[in-house]
Image (cartoon, rainbow, N blue to C red):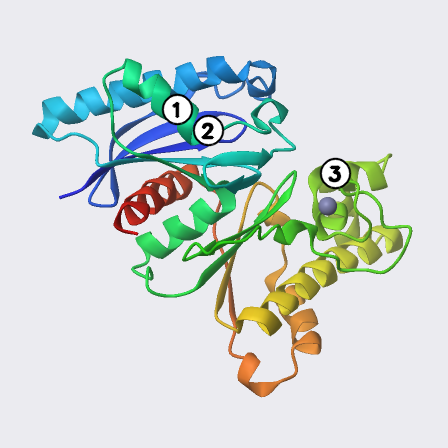
Amino acid sequence: MTTAIGVVIADHILTGRLKDQRLTGKLLRYPSDPEAMHELDAIPDSELIQIIAGHIDVLIGAAARDCAQKADAIGVAVPGVVRSGVVEESPNLKQLKGMRLTEKLAEALERHGITAPVHVANDADAIAAGVAATRGRLDKLTRVWTIGNGIGYGRWPCTDGVWEGGHITVTLDPKERFCGCGGAGHLEGIMGHRAMRMRFLDLEPDEVFANAKLGDARCREFVDLWHRALAAATASFIHLAGPGRFYFTGSNVGFLDLPLLRSHLETMVRMSPLQSFSLEILPPDDETAIIGAGVSALRALAE
Ligand SMILES: [Zn+2]
């Protein structure tokens, strides 16, 4: 039997315990009030580490009472570019940029008497790992788009590289400059929540999609562009790594019209061996990422 702890850092922190790759017991949440969002970016990095270490301590204590089992591994999912345990870039949690998260958390855990190895993964990669684990697909290539404030691209199995799929260039139009990273023509500059608010200063993103349904020409044109951009990025990954299954999730996945996306993709992917792709929407939930964080950490032990 394996026991792992999974931690997800998003606009809140969630920590859960996995027994044999399944969540068991209750999740711990910070801030405990789900309404108190956007609080995390104001908390210093050292304090965030203390909060996470404290939650892990509570769950490992519960595990020890439950089955006299220590945790085998601790996995943390965090938004941004993560390499070798270092958060190289984290646009939405700026205090994490440059942080040696694996090292800092391991040090904090040691003060709690916990020595289990810590593994840090990108949040979209953790969702891909969680999807693969919960569907018994750990031996297959699983790709996930997370559609929210930013656009994330996650893949399982983990491979070395940056994989910032949300910043793939999908247009050569020099006017397309709404991406949070400052890059021109990026997918996130079209699809990201913040980017849509900058484009439509007079409308919220949900109003844009609602108006498009009512026939407003400007909004319809944009909704089509939004789907074509996602189709273009997905087509690029099909042309690089092959067809297979793509999952779509995130806080704005409700905007996604799968038949419209498919119709654009079919115009972009014309080589017959590449046309066996499948597309599936997953309702957003935190548990998949927690499971994925834990599973990735357990897999990293074996490597
Ligand atoms: Zn960008």
The type of residue carrying mark 2 is Leu
Residue beneath disc 1: 105
The type of residue carrying mark 3 is Gly
8 is higher (above) or lower (below) than 231? above
N-term-proximal mark, 2 vs 3:
2
Figure quadrant of the N terminus:
top left
198 is higher (above) or lower (below) than 168? above
Residue beneath disc 3: 180
Q: Does the residue labelled 3 lie within 8 Å of ligand 1?
A: yes
Q: Residues within 10 Å of mark 2 (few under 14, many from 20)?
A: many
Q: Where is residue 18 in the image (x, y as percent from the top left)?
A: 25, 38
Q: Which residue is drawn at 83% across and 57% down?
A: 221
> Which dot marks residue 101?
2
Element class at badge 1:
helix
Q: Where is residue 241 in the image (x, y as percent from the top left)?
A: 54, 70
Q: Residue at x 67, y 59 (%)?
A: 230
147 is higher (above) or lower (below) than 79? below
Q: Residue at x 61, y 44 (%)?
A: 252
- Label 2 – label 1 distance at C-alpha: 6 Å
- Disc 2, disc 1: CB below 8 Å? yes
Q: Which residue lies furthest to the left in this view?
A: 68
Q: Nearer the viewer, residue 113 or 193?
A: 113
The type of residue carrying mark 1 is Leu
